Image: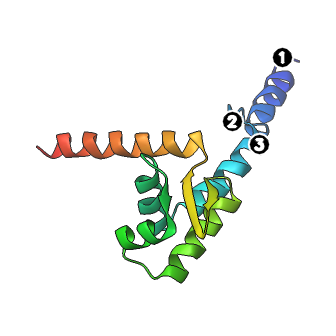
Amino acid sequence: MYWPNLRSSVEKQLVEPTTVLDVNFVKDVSKVIKCLGHPDRLRIVELLQSTPMKVKDIQAMVGLTQAVTSQHLRQMYHLGILRSTREGQNVIYSMGSPLVLRMLHCLEETQNMLKEDLR
């Protein structure tokens, strides 16, 4: 009689994995990660982590056309990664997500760790 209960318990553990991350959190974060999977978007958020910037300044720093820069900014704005304000004819973007700031910090730490390992 003991073995059927043990088997049922083991099967339950295999079928119902225990996870720490909330399902909705994982869905939301995966959208952000997918968006930041583009190298130009990562460069943009890295620029904006320290100071808000006008679209024209972001464009010049990243080296993209105004249209492409605006598309990237719009996508990140709609996901809440960035915030925007308008000053006259200028749109100024800033970081809107503490999650992305933390992700950037983790990327910097990982890069530094890898550089240390190569020495």
The residue wearing badge 1 is 2
Mark 3 and 1 residues: CB-CB less than 8 Å, in contact?
no
Residues 60 and 100: in front is 60
Q: Is residue 108 left or right of residue 12?
A: left
Q: Amino acid at mark 2?
A: Leu
User: Residue 56 in the image: x percent, y percent?
Assistant: 46, 71
Image point (69%, 34%), residue name? 19
Mark 3 and 2 residues: CB-CB less than 8 Å, in contact?
yes
Q: Which secondary structure, mark 2?
A: loop
The residue wearing badge 3 is 23
Of the two numbered discs 3 and 1 in the rendering, the one whose residue sits closer to the viewer: 3
The quadrant in which residue 40 appears is bottom left
Q: Which secondary structure, mark 3?
A: helix
Of the two numbered discs 2 and 1 in the rendering, the one whose residue sits closer to the viewer: 2
Image point (42%, 67%), residue name? 57
Q: Amino acid at mark 3?
A: Val
